[in-house]
Image (cartoon, grey):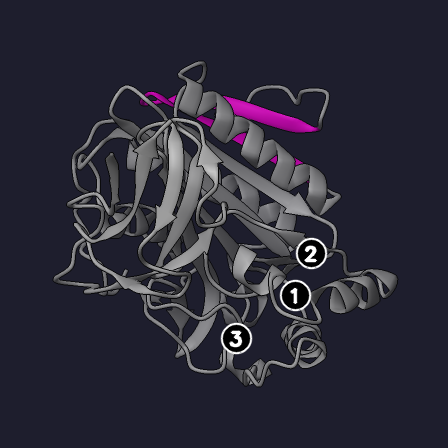
Amino acid sequence: MCEAADNAGASRAEGSGWQIVVAERPGPAKLGLKREHDIAGEVGAGTRNATIFIWRSQRALIVARGQAQWSGFEVAATRLAREGWPVLVRRSGGGAFPIGPGTVQLAMIARYPDRGMSMAGVYDRLSFLIGSALAEFGIAARVGDTRGAFCDGRHDLIVADRKIAGLAQHWRPCGRGERCVTAAASVLVDADVGELAGIVGWFHAICGQAIDIRPEAMTTIRDSFDAVALSHRNPTAEFLPYLAAAAARMGLSADSSRPTMPAGDGI
Amino acid sequence: MSEIAVPEGLWDTSKTPEGIVGNWFYRDGSMVEAGAKVAELMVEKTVFDITAPAAGELHILVPKDGVVRPGTLIGRIDGA
């Protein structure tokens, strides 16, 4: 499915009208986000097909614009960056979410006619895609929220009542009566959730926000999977082709049809 | 005068009744260009960009953090 790597260490494939781009090597999060935004710009401009961008990253704390407006944000961003956690602002909503070598990010980017696709429908597609990849490991995920998880939301994916993936979206008008939609997710594959919870808690504390984040509210693929599917050496890298394959299996098309799985049901 | 309204059908209100104005990117009374991103709405970890339907002077009717539904008039633009 994937062709030869390009100059950025990425590989790409096409199927069912969608292009799948995989950035296999963890680079600076700033570059990953920029590439996601560039792809969204091209999709919105009509110069690129709908695209699924799967990427890895070095450490960073990704926040929504709302958190960037908190008093104390600049101080927090400076302190975290000094400790190796640059703080970046994303376009989608939700709370602060840490990424790093133990997470995989995925963005599903497409144009839809106005009223041609719903927010819930986009969440369904993305959760189905990730859930299908998790199922390859024998992990039964379902859609729901988890009190105490960072960036909690009711369209997230959870395993045994613990968050394993966070989902969010960004919609913008792109002319011709269409909207460009970026549905983004980060999957906890092989991360130290205690460390990640600590980083988010520290960020909140500096910003004066009393938001309860508990490590036991999150889990990872490494902690959850049936040990057959992965070699254990580098589960994060090994998860990438499973995600890409799940995307291809879904036969995603850029039409306005609704997915078959309603939000809130198990995967 | 042009109205800035939350587009009908932007989200399914049977599942998520309300959203909020997450940000205004211009101050009340600012001059804006047609198509400029003037606000964003927040619904269920989803951000919806709202653009100016015409050029002119922006008047904000629903402030940041104000509750909105599809069809809510959040601002207007008096023609330049």
State whether residue A9 is above or below residue A62: above
Instruction: Give the magenta-colored segment's residue range.
Output: A9-26
| Residue wearing tag 3 | A218
Tell me which amino acid carries mark 1: Ala
Tell me which amino acid carries mark 3: Met
Label located before the other in sequence (1 or 2):
2
State whether residue A230 is above or below residue A194: above
Q: CA distance from mark 1 to mark 3?
A: 10 Å
Q: Nearer the viewer, residue B61 or A89?
A: B61
State whether residue B71 is above or below residue A27: below
**Left or right position of A215 against A198:** left
**Residue A15 belongs to the span the image colors magenta:** yes
Name which residue lies at 58% across and 60% down. Answer: A189
Label 1 element class:
loop
**Residue A204 belongs to the span the image colors magenta:** no
Tell me which amino acid carries mark 2: Gly
| Residue wearing tag 2 | A100
Label 3 element class:
loop
| Residue wearing tag 1 | A191
